[in-house]
Image (tube, rainbow, N blue to C red):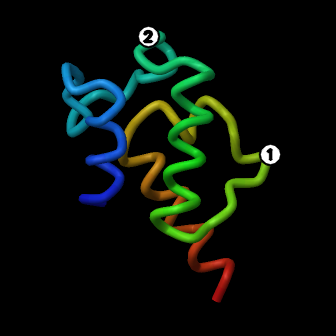
Amino acid sequence: MEALMEILQGLHPEVDFETCTTLVDDKIIDSFDIVSIISEISEEYDVVIPAEEIVEKNFNSAQALYALICRLEDEDE
């Protein structure tokens, strides 16, 4: 989770990613941010986020994003 928080803070240091649960809903992150996040997650966690997982609920909070990463890592095993 620490690496994910660093990725997110690098994009928007002014946002409290620990508590925010409306990143997409409130337009805190946009499609360009999501592309950057996906790229950095792929590098950091060695997972591929399939197109069908690129949905609002998976990107609305750091916790949801981390749950997605963990699920994808489990599927790779």
Question: Residue at horizontal 41%, vertical 15%?
Answer: 28
Question: Residue at horizontal 29%, vertical 28%?
Answer: 20
Q: Nearer the viewer, residue 42 or 75?
A: 42
Q: Position of residue 64 (x, y in %)?
A: 45, 46
Q: Is 7 left, or right, of 54 in this rendering?
A: left
Q: Nearer the viewer, residue 8 or 62?
A: 8
Q: Is 69 left, or right, of 55 in this rendering?
A: left
Q: Is residue 45 above or below residue 30?
A: below
Instruction: Identify the mark at residue 26; answer none if there is no mark.
Output: 2
Mark 1 belongs to which amino acid? Glu
Mark 2 belongs to which amino acid? Asp
Q: Which quadrant, please, contains the N terminus?
A: bottom left
Q: Position of residue 71 (x, y in %)?
A: 57, 68
Task: Classify mark 2: helix, strand or loop.
Answer: loop
Question: Residue at horizontal 64%, vertical 89%?
Answer: 77
Residue denoted by label 1 = 52
- Mark 1 or mark 2: whose residue is earlier in sequence: 2
Circles 1 and 2 in contact, beta carbons < 8 Å: no
Instruction: Identify the mark at residue 73; answer none if there is no mark.
Output: none
**Mark 2 closeness class: few <14, some 14–19, many ≥20 residues within 10 Å:** few
